[in-house]
Amino acid sequence: MFELAWPWIFILLPLPWLLRVLLPAADSGEAALKIGFLSELEELAGRKARANMPAWRQQIPFIALWLLLLMAAARPQWLGDPLPIAASGRDLLVAVDVSGSMDYPDMRLNDEDVSRLNLVKHLLGDFLASRQGDRVGLILFGSRAYVQAPLTFDRRTVRIWLDEAKVGIAGKNTAIGDAIGLAIKRLRQRPAQSRVLILVTDGANNAGQIDPVTAARLAAGEGVKIYTIGIGADPNQGGSLAMLGLSPSLDLDEPSLKEIADITGGRYFRARDGQQLQKIKQTLDKLEPVAQQPTQARPAQTLYRWPLAGALLLSLLLVVRERWPNTLLQRFFKQKAFLPSNEQWRQRLKRLRRRR
């Protein structure tokens, strides 16, 4: 189907005529010859003399040139038949706790002690990178929650931002409810079947404005499924601090995390070491992509080059006619071919004198 992308361009159609009417006539800089016996010459020639302005027939090439330029500017295009574009996958947000306790080195990765946040970066970074076809985003929360990466197909950039996360960047406390509320705000505009939040924390809610259970009920109302992950070694396996009863794992509020997952139809996972978190990642990898509403697109073939090429060719012909008047084209239209010869002019002048 033929279509003009910018048909309003044709409102410029009368622009040359308006400029000629409104602007003063240009001075050619050439001397003008006034003929006192013009009427006699018109009688001899048998026709009226030409006016200063060329006849409308001589304006046809310029009118055609202007129309071709307007047609090219209007962006003509040929639209093909609508083609469906299948879209699949989830809109998946990962909310990671970056409070002060996430710096506690009670996790094991490759037989080395690492902090909780470093382990999350390593394994959840791999998880995000493998979610081909999903939109993924990242929320970091501590005393406050904020969006580090909006929902995007650029999984590599999201992983880089996760790797750059620092403990305490959002405060030392834990605002689980605010993180869930922020995720609801970001996911509510997406199809209801594809809203997923993975919440990773090692503590209990002790900051923010929203109660986590209340936020979970709001999430359930918006169709957001929440998978919660409680991270941290058992209190009796946290090293010397655990022996003194100072392990941060004592702050983990597992009942609330289980309730959040149950309310929203998700699941709760407990990660006590790197192997368990690896198994959790594998379980989450089994989430099947949810088909979204397919979109349609119509392939468009641009056609502006054809009127533009016509305008260029016509411009060249006009230049040739003006610069090289002895061409075959100019000779064909040369006016003297249709005028009387010099001898005929003399005979007509003699006849005119006799009549007088």
Image: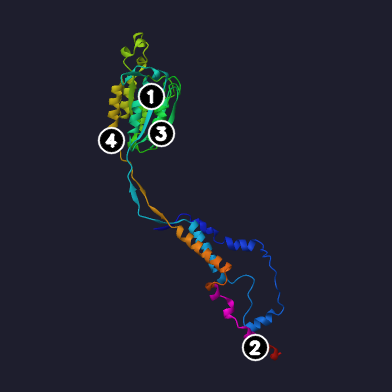
Is residue 115 placed above or below 190 in the rendered structure? above
SS of the residue under disc 3: helix
Sequence-wise, the earlier of marks 4 and 1 is: 1
Q: Do the residues labelled 3 and 1 touch (CB within 8 Å)?
A: no
Marks 4/3: CA–CA distance:
23 Å
Q: Which amino acid does label 3 sit on?
A: Thr
Q: Which amino acid does label 1 sit on?
A: Pro
Q: Would residue 62 be found to the left or right of residue 248 on screen? A: right
SS of the residue under disc 4: loop
SS of the residue under disc 2: helix
Few, some or many C-alpha atoms within 10 Å of disc 3 (few <14, some 14-19, many ≥20)? some
Is residue 351 placed above or below 13 in the rendered structure? below
**In x, y percent, where is residue 307?**
47, 61
Residue in view at x 45 percent, y 60 percent = 306
Tell me where the magenta segment starts and ends, as one range.
330-346
* Residue to which mark 1 is pinned: 212
